[in-house]
Each structure stands twice: as C-alpha cells, then as structure tokens.
Image: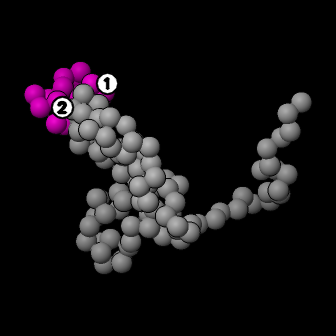
Amino acid sequence: MLSDCLDWTPDKSGQQTLVNANTWGNLPYAWPDNLAPPQKTESQYYIFWMQNMPGEQNGIRYGTNVMANWWRFTADWDAAITQRRGLYKAPEVKFLPDATRSDTAPSAPP
C-alpha cells in the first residue's frame, strides 16, 4: 500500500512509498542475543512505527510552527495533558554564544 510514513508531514505533502509487512519485517534490528521474538514482524512494526514518530528537534514544519516531540505523549501522557502540551509548537531559536554570522555561514567553494 502507499504510505507517507517515511516522509510524514502534517499537510500530507510527504513522498509516498509502497510499504507492506516486509518494509519493517526485513529491517536488520539487533535483537538481544541475536534472538528475534516469535512475532518478529509484529514487533518490528512497532519499532518502525515509533522510529517514525516526530521526536526531539524533528524539524517538521506545520505552518509557522514545528511539530513537537510526540515521545513526551508516549512516555508520560498524564504529564503531557497536565502541562497542556500540543502536537505542535512555535519554533525555538537558539544562538551560539559569541557566534557571528560568518561563523555559521557556509564557505564559498574554492
């Protein structure tokens, strides 16, 4: 089936690719002691799904905002609700101490 899970964006502009159980079932995960569980494909689906969830500093834009770290919902739903966290937020800009524009500008090719 076609899915944008590998390039997901909230506006559905991500590239769609064909996926099926082999997409995650054939990924080379390092299982403890090299022993995959009997339900390997199902287990790897959950890993695949969670690895494609927006995480810390994911850079996925949503209008003028960016997607928040959805792992905060997964790890502690109650705190996320209590703290009124949303699925997106205003982007945070962090400046390096003592940095100048020339410090961060790409250099010209020789």
Residue depicted at 32% across the width and 71% down the height: 80
Q: How many marks?
A: 2
**Front residue of 18 and 21:** 18
Res. 24 in view: no
49 relative to 64 in the view: left or right: left
Quadrant in which the C terminus appears: top right
Q: Which residues are magenta?
A: 24-43
92 relative to 105 in the view: left or right: left
Q: Is 57 rendered above or below residue 6?
A: below
How far from the left and from the top, in percent, is residue 35?
Answer: 18, 23
Tell me the element at label 2: helix
Quadrant in which the N terminus appears: top left
Check disc 1: other Cα within 10 Å, few if <14, some if 14-19, many if 20+: few
* Residue type at numbered disc 2: Thr
Q: How is the image coloured?
A: one colour
Tell me the element at label 1: loop
Task: Specify the label residue 14 is tagged with.
Answer: none
How far from the left and from the top, in percent, is residue 100?
Answer: 83, 57
Q: Is 21 rendered above or below residue 16?
A: above
Distance between the alpha carbons at the discs numbered 2 and 1: 11 Å
Residue depicted at 24% across the width and 33% down the height: 20
How far from the left and from the top, in percent, is residue 107?
Answer: 83, 40
Residue hosting label 2:
41
Residue depicted at 32% across the width and 34% down the height: 18
In this view, which residue lies farthest toward the top? Answer: 34
* Residue type at numbered disc 1: Pro
User: Is residue 42 part of the magenta span, yes or no?
Assistant: yes
Residue hosting label 1:
28
**Are the residues tagged 2 and 1 within 8 Å (C-beta)?**
no
